[in-house]
Amino acid sequence: MDFAFIITIFLIGFIGSYVSGMLGIGGSIIKYPMLLYIPPLFGLAAFSAHEVSGISAIQVFFATIGGVWAYRKGGYLNKTLIIYMGSAILIGSFVGGYGSKLMSEGGINLIYGILALIAAVMMFIPKKGIDNVPLDQVTFNKWIAASFALIVGIGAGIVGAAGAFLLVPIMLVVLKVPTRMTIASSLAITFISSIGATVGKITTGQIDYFPAFIMIVASLIASPLGAMAGKKMNTKVLQVILAVLIAATAVKIWIDIL
């Protein structure tokens, strides 16, 4: 196996996982397009949309473990939010991950484009005063949270993402959860979601194991480092970075689809 290939895949995994830990997303929003476009750019192996979604699914599983571990102290993990949204997204992501085998390459990319577009629009909606609420006084509608998580899970399972790039704007805009609690809890929910997506992809033979292994190693190193950086950053800065990232990905995917 080409050394340049190993280094390229490792760097994609490292960058994606660092951002994942910092912003509370599984990192697929970045790694999906990077895996699809960067290796062919350097004349390396080109992955199909099915292979990319499979590698993304298994890699997100490991990236989120590192992020959750870094956020385990400080009251940032909201257990009620994690249980309700986690259970719903696990069911949805398994259904989506298993059903994706029946979809075409174009269909998977289209679903990804729609999800990224919705997430991008939501991230630019003003979020006033959500970070002024003390962490132990945060309240939200449990059934609205679970319903959104189920829908996100199905779409995310199809593209091999864990859906955090959509969960984060839903938690900020709809449920009004403070930024740091959103980041920490979404990493935990994303970890649960990635179990369903990973099982769905493995049972239908959609995972290329060698690049997936390289991405996993990169994730376990980079994700806790990103989470430590995220704890120190201003919450407004974190929101802006996330919004720009999601918007840029949505634009790139839609240019390709159209």
Image (tube, rainbow, N blue to C red):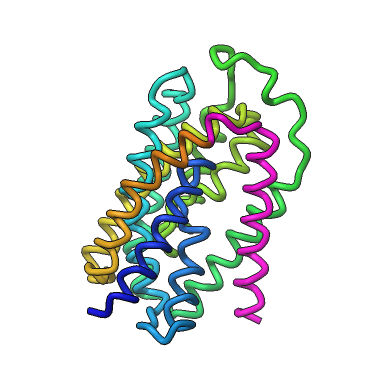
Principal secondary structure, stretch drawn in magenta: helix
Residue 166 placement (x, y as % from top left)? 56, 49
Which residue sits furthest front? Answer: 3
Q: Which quadrant would the N terminus be assigned to in this image?
A: bottom left
How many numbered circles are shown? Answer: 0
Q: Is residue 208 left or right of residue 130?
A: left
Residue 154 visible within the image: no
Q: Nearer the viewer, residue 235 or 106?
A: 235
Q: Is residue 254 left or right of residue 197?
A: right
Relative to 32, does residue 222 appear above or below in the rendering? above
Residue at image location 42% in from the left, 31% down from the top: 82
Relative to 141, does residue 194 appear above or below in the rendering? below
- For residue 171, which quarter of the picture? top right
Q: Nearer the viewer, residue 19 or 148?
A: 19
Residue 119 placement (x, y as % from top left)? 63, 53
Q: Is residue 233 left or right of residue 213?
A: right
Which residue sits furthest bottom? Answer: 43
Residue 237 placement (x, y as % from top left)? 68, 39
- For residue 84, which quarter of the picture? top left
Range of magenta residues: 230-258
Q: Which quadrant would the C terminus be assigned to in this image?
A: bottom right
Residue at image location 65% in from the left, 47% down from the top: 241
Q: Is residue 248 magenta?
A: yes
Relative to 164, does residue 48 appear above or below in the rendering? below
Q: Is residue 214 magenta?
A: no
Residue at image location 61% in from the left, 80% down from the top: 256
Relative to 122, does residue 74 appear above or below in the rendering? above
Residue 238 visible within the image: yes
Residue at image location 64% in from the left, 35% down from the top: 172
